[in-house]
Image (cartoon, rainbow, N blue to C red):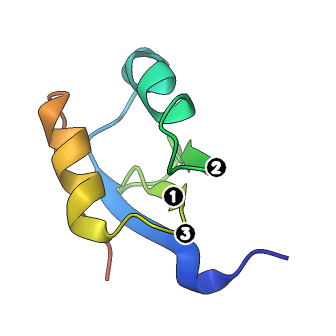
Amino acid sequence: MENLDHILLFKTDIKTEDCKAKLQSILDNHSAISKWNVALDDEDFVLRIVSESLNHQQVIELIKTHGHFCCELT
């Protein structure tokens, strides 16, 4: 079972499979990310990251660097 302290949730503008595919290699190959997914059917296009070492701000910067909106989901 995953430790809930290591699940980070974000509201994004990753709205399509194409957008998701452009980020896939970046997120799949990031050494600090063990799992991730984007809920394309959710109105907030929620990005879920499982990481034991990253914090919300680091993920936000990573996603913004690649041209997408991202903010912590509270």
Asked if labels 1 and 2 touch by Cβ distance under 8 angstroms, the answer is: yes
Residue 25, image x, y percentages: 49, 20
Q: In this view of the protein, which residue sits in the foreground, 13 or 55?
A: 55
From mark 3 to mark 1, how far is it between C-alphas? 13 Å
Q: Which mark is residue 52?
A: 3
Q: Which mark is residue 24?
A: none
Label 2 or label 1, whichever lies nearer to me, is 2
Task: Examine the image and state in which quarter residue 55 appears.
Answer: bottom left
Residue 49, image x, y percentages: 51, 57
Q: Residue at horizontal 19%, vertical 36%? A: 68
Label 2 crowding class (10 Å Cα cut-off): few <14, some 14-19, many 20+? Answer: few
From mark 3 to mark 2, how far is it between C-alphas? 11 Å
Q: Residue at horizontal 53%, vertical 62%? A: 51
Q: Which residue is mark 2?
A: 35
Q: Is residue 47 visible?
A: yes
Residue 33, image x, y percentages: 53, 49
Label 3 or label 1, whichever lies nearer to me, is 3
Label 1 crowding class (10 Å Cα cut-off): few <14, some 14-19, many 20+? Answer: some
> What element does badge 3 sit on?
loop
Image check: 73 left or right of 38?
Answer: left
Marks counted in the figure total 3
Badge 2 amino acid: Lys
Q: Which residue is mark 1?
A: 48
Quadrant location of the C terminus in the rendered image:
bottom left
Badge 1 amino acid: Arg
Q: In this view of the protein, which residue sits in the foreground, 51 or 46?
A: 51
Q: Earlier in the sequence, mark 3 or mark 2?
A: 2
Asked if residue 70 is positioned above or below residue 16 in the image, the reply reads below
